[in-house]
Amino acid sequence: MKKFLRRNIVVIIILLVFGAFFLYGDYQVIQNNQDIAEINNSLQEECKTKVITDEGEKKFCHEILTNKVIEPDFYSEFSEVLVWHVQTVSYFLFLIVIIPPMILICKMFRNKYIINTSLRESYRGFIKKMLFTAYKYLWILPVLIIILIIPLLMNYSLVPEYSVVYNMGWSTSLIYYPVLFFILYLLNVVILSMLYVNISLVVARFQHKFIPCIILSYIIFFSFEIFLETVVRVLILQRVFHTEIGMIFNIINILGFDDLFGIPALFIVNISFLVLSFIAVYLAYRNKEKFIISCEANN
């Protein structure tokens, strides 16, 4: 048990810290809705029992007593939590995804694993083992999202009446199919998580020290996002093609699941980025000799 905890201490800390943060966001939203409901109930009771003579107050009470109250649903509150309570950690989610695998990957490279096993294992076998190690923690962010979702599912309906009436949350018909919504949402998170890992794998090929690898990966990640936001979205798509579709060219907002231009468009964009990242990984590691030389240079 101690050995397991020692090996996975970083993952455990991530789950505890961010899980608590996500649950606190749920608590704030649920508590806020309960407070609003209590205020409405109090106003209704007051209007039922109080003798009212003022015309303005009569009109107010008539609206309170006759207007249909639409209860918030899961989708509206999930969106509320993401936008107002979880959005602040979006810039750290990249680190959540890459830190656990990069600890092991950088250790492999620093310890010259490829050199020590070259007689027993083919280079292709080494690459497969490296990729397995890199992707073995892709479950972390989906688990955190499930932690975020569970309290909302326990407190709100999956019937999206509130979301439709008040235009909150997601706009596509996908919200009428909860199981499909959850599957596609988590699949999109996994796709972007793999993109994050691939960025760090390319960096790790040339920088085997853990902390510099993480810092350089973060810089490249943000540089790519700035390029997408300024060059692709503003200069090309907005000014040349006069379209706002560049809004879905956002690799930082991994929790957003932006369906403004449809779910297929979102997946086409994100899968295209993922394919490009796989090409970059292939180009970075295709030369075995150069990679071994770089590992040999480690002290």
Image: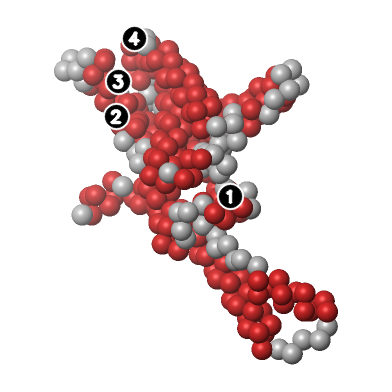
User: What residue is pinned by disc 3?
Assistant: 127
Can residue 208 be seen by looking at this rendering? yes
For the residue carrying disc 4, how many other residues have a C-alpha within 10 Å: few (<14), some (14-19), or many (20+)?
Answer: few
Q: Quadrant of the N terminus?
A: bottom left
Q: CA distance from mark 1 to mark 2?
A: 42 Å
Question: Which one is nearer the viewer's eye here, 98 or 144?
Answer: 144
Amino acid identity at mark 2 = Phe
Q: Position of residue 259 (x, y in %)?
A: 56, 36
Q: CA distance from mark 4 to mark 3?
A: 14 Å
The disc, 4 or 3, on the residue closer to the chain's N-terminal end is: 3
Q: Position of residue 258 (x, y in %)?
A: 56, 37
Q: Position of residue 166 (x, y in %)?
A: 63, 53
Q: Residue sitting at 49 percent across and 45 percent down?
A: 175
Tag nearer the camera, 2 or 4: 2
Circle 3: element type: helix
Which disc is residue 132 wearing? 2
Q: In this view, which residue lies farthest toward the right?
A: 55
Q: In this view, which residue lies farthest toward the left?
A: 120
Circle 4: element type: helix
The disc, 2 or 4, on the residue closer to the chain's N-terminal end is: 2
User: What residue is pinned by disc 4?
Assistant: 289
Which disc is residue 164 wearing? 1
Question: Which one is nearer the viewer's eye here, 189 or 42?
Answer: 42
Q: Is residue 145 left or right of residue 247?
A: left
The disc, 1 or 4, on the residue closer to the chain's N-terminal end is: 1
Q: CA distance from mark 3 to mark 2?
A: 9 Å
Q: Residue sitting at 82 percent across and 76 percent down?
A: 56
The disc, 3 or 1, on the residue closer to the chain's N-terminal end is: 3
